[in-house]
Every structure is written in C-alpha cells, then in structure tokens.
Image (cartoon, grey):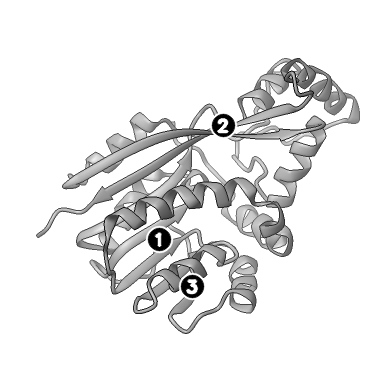
Amino acid sequence: MLQQYNKQQIANSFSQAATNYDRVAILQRTVAEYLFEKLKKLQIAPKAILDLGAGTGQLTQQLALKFPKSMITAVDIAFGMLNYGQLNYSKDNIRWLCADVEKLPLKNHFYDLIFSNLMLQWSSNHKISFLEIWRTLKPNGVLIFSTLGPETLKELRYCWQKIDNHLHVHSFISSELLTQSIGEHQPSYISIEVKYCFRYYYQAIDLMKELKTLGANNMQENRYKGLTTKKKLQKVIEVYEKFRNPQRLLPATYEIYLILATKRPQ
C-alpha cells in the first residue's frame, strides 16, 4: 500500500534536525558502512554520482573522498540539511540541490552511480521514485541504496497497538514490493541483502527522543494527529518494559535492506 506524506513537513522536520543529526545518527552511519563495503567490491570509477537523500552531507563527503575525480550531486528535500552540508562537508566536486526524489530536475541517463542511504522510506510512491532513478541512471550504471523493512521499530509499534488503534509508528514497505518495483525496469543484475541492526536504551523515552532529534517522526498522512497525553505516553513506556533484556536494556529493532542493481546497456 502506498503511504501519503506531507512533504513540506518532512522537509521542515529534517531541516530543524540538521545541527544535531550527525550526533545521534549512529544507525545511519552503521548502515552507510555496509553500503561502502559493497562499493569497495565493485571497483568502479564513476564520472558522475548522485547522492539521494544526502542529508547533512557527511556521506557525500565520504563519496567525494573515495571518488575524487567524480562530480557528485547531493540531493535532499530538506534545505536546512543541505545548508548544513555546504557549511560543514563541502568539497570542490560536490554540488548541492534541494529536490524531491519523485521529481528530479536532472538529465536523463547522466549518472554512473546512484547512492542512497536510508532515504527511500520517506517516499510516498517508491514506483515513481524508481522511475526517476532509472531515468537519470546511465546504461550499465549502478544503483546502491539502503532502506528500512516492516520489522523496523516493531517493539515501539507493538506498545502503541496495546494502547489504541491509531497509527503512531511509521510503516515500511517489504522487500518483495521493492524487488518487484525494481524488476519492472529489467535490471541486468539485482541483489538484496537483509540485515538486522539493534539500538539499545536505558528507557523507552530515550528512543523516542532520539527519533525526534533525528527528525524521523511519523509523518504519514493517516497517522494519529491527536494530542499524545502524558498518560498514554506513560502506558507505552510501561508496556515497553516487557522487552527489557538480561543486560537490563531496551532494544529497538531495525530491519535493513541493502540493495544493489545494475541498469541494462542500451
């Protein structure tokens, strides 16, 4: 099922999170390391790279250092993120562009490599996103990206479901739907690797504060938009206690998809 988002709200939320994002983006850096390990094995020398969902630009800078002869376009929907990136991670071979992945103002068949770390889950329509990605990717070009699967934040989702019937936690699309959408473009190669990452907290409220600091709030249009009372929040915190492990910590599960695809030659 397609999820609808208020894109301006997404842009505003991540823009506001820009100055503190890198401090708490531990999961994001871990997943990025997985992608860079895959890049090492490819042994490619792309002339033009597109970083979709570049955020603060920290990973864009890593791409610029890894491929110093490449021209890199850093795209994000949040102007505040890009502004932070320009101030803190700028390189001569990076240009910055505020745009939506579902409507990229970029040339056809231009990029040798399209890189994206934990961005696609914010797209309302992943099929349109892949249409745009495939349009801008050169024949024989490589797409490498990560996104989140449905088991992500399953503990927090479970807790809210015990409190009421409203949607409080972001929904994520399955690997089957992703594979199907990419498969429609008939790539010459595709691989999907699933990994599980875990973050641990002393208290459930620490997880919620981290998500807020990241700007990663639930911004689906069908989410619960009423006031979350202290009483409800306390109940969620109490239910979350059932997940406390022998080390006396509370886990948060992240289901990670690492996807690599190659566009067919013309």
- Give the residue at the far right of this rendering: 230
Q: Position of residue 182 (x, y in %)?
A: 28, 43
Please state which amino acid type lies under the numbered disc 3.
Leu
Q: Secondary structure at mark 1?
A: loop
- Measured Cα–Cα span from mark 3 to mark 2: 29 Å
Q: Residue at x 25, y 68 (%)?
A: 108
Q: Considering only vertical position in the picture, is 25 above or below 150? A: below
User: Which of the numbered marks, if any, corresponds to residue 152?
Assistant: 2
Kindly check if marks 1 and 2 are in contact, taking CB atoms under 8 A apart as contact: no
Query: Nearest the camera: 148 or 43?
Result: 43
Q: Assess disc 3: are there few (<14), some (14-19) or many (≥20) residues with their C-alpha within 10 Å of its C-alpha.
A: many
- Pick the quarter of the image with the C terminus: bottom left
Which marked residue is nearer to the observer: mark 3 or mark 2? 2
Q: Position of residue 217 (x, y in %)?
A: 67, 43
Query: Nearest the camera: 183 or 253?
Result: 253
- Measured Cα–Cα span from mark 1 to mark 3: 12 Å
Q: Considering only vertical position in the picture, is 7 above or below 206? A: below
The answer to whether residue 185 is left or right of residue 174 is left
Query: Nearest the camera: 21 or 228?
Result: 21
* Residue carrying label 1: 103
Q: Secondary structure at mark 3?
A: strand
Mark 3 / mark 2, whichever is N-terminal: 3
* Residue carrying label 3: 97
Tell me how many marks there are.
3
